[in-house]
Amino acid sequence: MPQKHRKLESPISQQPRIKRQDLGTPNPMEQHPAQPPHPAALAPLPQQQHQQPLYPVHPVDPETSDTWAACAKCALSIGHLELAFRSCQSALDKNPANALALSTISATYREDDMKTKGDRGVENALNILNDAIRMYPSLGSDPLILKELAHCQALKGFYDQAHATLEHILSMSITDPEVWLMEGKALIRMGARAGAQSKNMAVNAFRSALDRTMKPLSLEAAAITRQCHSELAAIAFSEGNLDGAALELSNTLALPLPDEAQKYELSCTWCALAVTKEANGDIQGAMQICDTAEKVLGLYPRLLITEAYLLLIQPTVENAVKAAQLLQVVIQKTDDHWDNKEGDFLPYYLLGCAYAAVEDPSNAYEALHVALSRAPASAFPWLSVGALYLRLGQLRDSLAAYSKAAKLKEEIVGYATAVVTWKGLDCVYERCDKQFSDAANACTRAAEFARLAGDMRTNAQLEQRSHALLAAARGEAPVPKLQQPPEPPLQLLRDLTIMSPDERIELMNRQNVQQQQIEQQAQPLPQAPPMQQQSSLHFQRGPPPPVGAANGTSVAPQAPSVASAAPGPPGPSPQQFSPRQQVGYQQQFSPHHQVPGYQGQYIAPVNREGQSTPLSRPVVSILSPSSGIPANGQAPQYHYGQGKAVPPINPVGAPQIRPGGQYAQFPHPTERPREYI
């Protein structure tokens, strides 16, 4: 039997086979928990004493890299960001200078930031693109890389750099319509609406983008066309060209419907078109646009708020009921894709106006106080609360609400709002007994603000009414007919409706900060303690202590009290006033300032210009938003500082205002509210 052959040993030492490891770059979007390493992997490999690089160096394979880049582009188009990111990494491993892979990974970062509402992805994209251009200078002339770089620069607010990058792309005779769209947007963000030349350049850029879109339109071309028409409409609207804005917005309606991510932007366009038609006087056309948009796009909060605003312009009972139903949907909806912000006051304000239109003061009160808690520096809720109290005949509460609005700086709230505020104060004083001079003063202030606002017609009407009120105060003419409470300015309410919730919240926060700064600067210096010496104008019980006329020394009283004879410093009397305070106190409680029907209640005149010390006002406690709507769901409690007042309407456990009942004495017969059950 032949001898068995021995197995020959190889002259090359055999290495144990090691399973191939996944050395790809970890995905920053999704961090997986680290797995414990295998014990065999911890042993040092023979003949590999030198340190291995962190990222393996693969041979350049352009074809494989292009395949991975195409896969990444496809994954990004269907919204699979993680797959797109990994495909881009594989493409860059094969070819670090792949322009398509670099632009796709940058676009993936941007899409991820849009979903997570962050900005770290854009920063990473900028670093990747800048490093690639620095390592491979040939990429600095690639349109894909430059366009993506301009996208990131614009998102970070570097509009000057984005404009320079886009100009470099256009110098290469590129006919991409998206580049022209980005150029127009960059010019707009740089302040194109302020300068005529830059504005014309932006308009020309948008027109060039529209001319370069291929027909028939693809989904990307339709999105570019829609954005161009929207930007042109915004420019026309800023110039006051409402017909041109309506025409540009109408062009967007003929385009194919976008995907779900772009429907919100399209709903904003429809809202702008509806408000534009309303500004031109076509309210019915604006309502039809809202109805069509709701059928096509669905129930978006902006559409519902805009429709409610249009319904409340002509507040019939039917319109007010429908507006309240729409606003309840906006308030109660809490889906993430809805643009329903927690601090937005406009839905609650419009809801309060709707309840007031259907004569439901309890719900109107609650909705308006929620609006006040969210926008304390806005005059709109205060004006509506003042008008609500005025219709109920609660003059003290109406005065307090209008006074709150009058304290807001007119440079912040606008001159048109100041006109409405002082007209409301005029209406309050006209319903008081013999306070026509104060009403004339408020009317004069309203006329002055109307002149500053450029409304000369209203200025002339208010000045004429002020003269009539002064003549009535002197008894030279009959009392003018009472006016209804004024409505807030429609133009300012229209501007608030056009804004997004984020813009409204930012505006209210800015107004709050400005108002607080003004109030801090206007705080009076600490006053000296009240004078121990009293003048002849006093309101203490019993006769005043006599005062010497020549030397100012006090004469001993004829019948000193026990308290005056007791040793020790006398305590300050709670009813001692300085002469200036006494004059204000006497004017406040003068018999000529009584409100008919409310014995013991008085309304102090609003401070006139030139008074160094404000007059004292009655202690009127308007409910704060937190106390007005208790968390336990009970009916709000109302507290008044002085006398017996007509309580607001409460749904449960409160007196009801009924004609001919206990609270039926109102300043004017026409001001009696109807019976509320």
Image: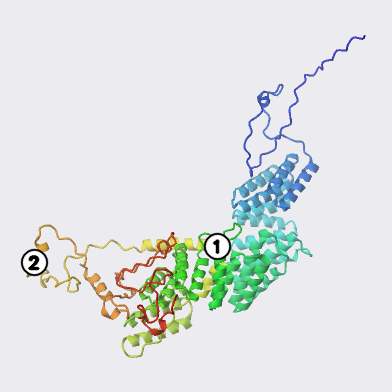
Question: Which of the pair 228/423 is nearer the observer?
Answer: 423
- Residue 476 in the image: state x and y as whole percent: 32, 90
Q: Secondary structure at mark 1?
A: helix
The reply, left or right, for residue 237 in relation to residue 89 is: left
According to the image, label 1 marks what residue?
Answer: 332
> Which quadrant is the C terminus positioned in?
bottom left
Disc 2 crowd rating (10 Å Cα; few below 14, some 14-19, many 20+) is few
- Residue 275 in the image: state x and y as whole percent: 59, 72
The residue at 66%/58% (across/down) is 261
Residue type beneath disc 2: Pro
Question: Which of the 4 image quarters holds residue 260?
Answer: bottom right
Residue 239 sits above or below residue 123 on the image: below
Question: Which of the 4 image quarters holds residue 182?
Answer: bottom right
> Which quadrant is the N terminus positioned in?
top right
Residue type beneath disc 1: Gln
According to the image, label 2 marks what residue?
Answer: 560
The reply, left or right, for residue 399 in relation to residue 578 is: right
Question: Which of the pair 623/54 is nearer the observer?
Answer: 623
Whether residue 96 appears in this view of the structure is: no
